[in-house]
Image: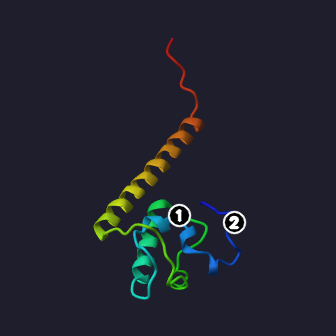
Amino acid sequence: METDSNLPRDHEDYPLTHFVWARWIGLLEVTETNWRKVYLRAVQVQAARGPEAVEITPELVRRHIGQRLGAYQFSDAMFRKQTSELFELRVERELKQWEERQLKDSPAIPSNQ
């Protein structure tokens, strides 16, 4: 799990832009009309990337209505494509870590000489 040593103990005022997923959701800001979409995309990105230090909740997103998130806006199709790629990278990373542990933990195979 990733942690941020600069993360305040109470996360109520922690800006959403500090979360890694903020740049991946493809929405310019949190508004009264799109906060649900921000939440939905944030949860999807978090699931694709893996857990972070702070749980994404509807309350957390709603507290940030009016906050600018990033410089890019993605269509729903582009968001799904990028999230799928993020998930694939996560799975590949986890598989590589598993393989490395298997090599480290397995006994050396004697050669037939």
Does the rendering let one see residue 46? no
Query: What residue is pinned by disc 1?
Result: 20
Using residue 15 as the reference point, say whether residue 89 is left or right of it.
Answer: left
Image quadrant in which you'd find residue 27: bottom left
Tell me how far mark 2 sits from mark 1, CA to CA.
Answer: 14 Å
Q: Is residue 35 above or below residue 111?
A: below
Q: Amino acid at mark 1?
A: Val
Q: Residue at x 54, y 70 (%)?
A: 17
Q: Position of residue 90 (x, y in %)?
A: 46, 54
Query: What residue is pinned by disc 2?
Result: 6
Question: What kind of element bears circle 1?
Answer: helix
Q: Are marks 2 and 1 in contact (CB under 8 Å)?
A: no
Q: Amino acid at mark 2?
A: Asn
Q: Is residue 98 above or below residue 71?
A: above
Using residue 98 as the reference point, say whether residue 27 is left or right of it.
Answer: left
Pointer 2: residues within 10 angstroms few (<14), some, or many (20+)? few
Q: Residue at x 57, y 68 (%)?
A: 18
